[in-house]
Amino acid sequence: MKTLRQKLLLLAQIVATLLTGGPTGFALGVRVKDLVMVAGARDNQLVGYGLVSGLNNEGDQNPVHTLQSIANMLLRFGINIPAATLSVKNVGAVMVTADIPAFSKPGARLDVTVSSLGDAKSLVGGVLLQTPLVGADGKVYAVAQGEVSIGGFSAGAGGGGGASVQKNHPTTGQIINGALVENEIPATIVRNNYVELMLREPDFTSAARLAEAINEKFADSAEAVDSTSVRVKLPENAEEAPVEFIAHLEAIEVTPDAPARIIINERTGTIVATSRIKISSCAVSHGNLTITIASTLDVSQPSPFSQTGTTEVTPRTDTKVNESKAALVPFPELPTVEKVATALNALGVTPRDMMSIFQAMKQAGALQAELLIR
């Protein structure tokens, strides 16, 4: 049997574990590194024009730009052939795109996406020839080359009966680690002894909470500039090691503020609602009106042994209207998303009906949330 003192100590340990967010407790917030990005440490886009060979008669059907590109490539190897004399269907002109992360050093590998530019039917089995990738400033930062992985196929086009089978898009593919970085893009993350943190989801409340959380650990160092930016001053002992200071910033936990928002996708029937939506007291009635129109053909035949009568076909249309009964259901004030979901599910409505109810609630002023329809 445990003594009263032992029980009190055990209770104190459990409470301390809950308050500190231990294994049995709740997380205090979200890490700063999952909420923000450091200004200057951004990706950059690269693009290039190239050729994919080995397409087994599935390539471009001799467009002018492809023929000229092949002639220019052969000229680099000392082979001078007029473009008008070429007829190559195993090659396709493509655009190559990639994102290069900040601080990527020469020799690092990048994933690239290859997409057909001409009228090639498929890039299956193709090999991308050496393609320079340039940035917005026109300078070459990487070079791509390698076998194109499609992840799909196209077969049967033009065969007997015109049947064809296609999976995914055979004219777009990827080359994993298909590009080599040749030049590093300069990036600056510390300006005038300040580091700027940019929220991925701009919000004034979240920015203020972020600055407050940083100031609790590094006194009087952070300032919320606007809904997106929080400026942090480096301590004197961190000026020579900003990376270590940023690592400490990223480990801080913050509770971001999520706006009350409902997103509706009519194409897929998807509804997503945040936890802060609120519905004021209202009454909802939702009924289904179904109209069915059926058209049939009636045949009118002449009487037996008639010499002048002819068979006539006349259309006949039957229309039915069915409206299901619906009661006016009163809704009390619903302050949480759980209660909203329970109340709407109790009506037995489909997701598409739920979309109409949300729109009507918004028009009536009962829905206290932002409604976005995609």
Image (cartoon, grey):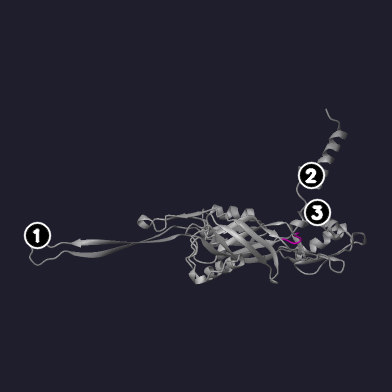
Q: Which badge, 1 or 3, is on the more N-terminal residue? A: 3
Q: CA distance from mark 1 to mark 3?
A: 96 Å
Q: Amino acid at mark 3?
A: Ala
Looking at the image, the residue that sits furthest to the right is 236
The disc placed on residue 363 is none
Badge 3: few (under 14), some or many (20 or more) residues near its Cα, within 10 Å?
few
Q: Position of residue 247 (x, y in %)?
A: 82, 55
Could you tell which of marks 1 and 2 lies nearer the N-terminus? 2
What's under tag 2, amino acid-wise? Gly
**Residue 64, image x, y percentages:** 51, 71
In this rendering, the answer to whether 16 lies above or below 59 is: above
Nearest-to-viewer mark from 1 and 3: 3
Q: Nearer the viewer, residue 38 or 332?
A: 38
Residue position marked by numbered label 3 in the rendering: 251
Secondary structure of the residue carrying tag 1 is: loop
Give the side of residue 226 with respect to residue 218, left or right.
left
Judge left or right: residue 193 versus residue 109.
right
Image quarter of the C terminus: bottom right
Is 197 situated left or right of 127 in this image?
A: right
Amino acid at the residue labelled 1: Pro
* x and y, in percent, of residue 264 in the image: 57, 61
Residue 361 placement: quadrant: bottom right
Q: Which residue position is annotated with label 2? A: 22
Residues drawn in magenta: 101-105
Note whether 151 is above or below 8 in the view shown.
below
305 part of magenta stretch: no
Q: Position of residue 250 (x, y in %)?
A: 80, 56
Q: Is residue 60 visible?
A: yes
Q: Secondary structure at mark 2?
A: loop
Which quarter of the picture shows residue 70? bottom right
Q: Is residue 342 above or below residue 223?
A: above
Q: Which residue is mark 1?
A: 304
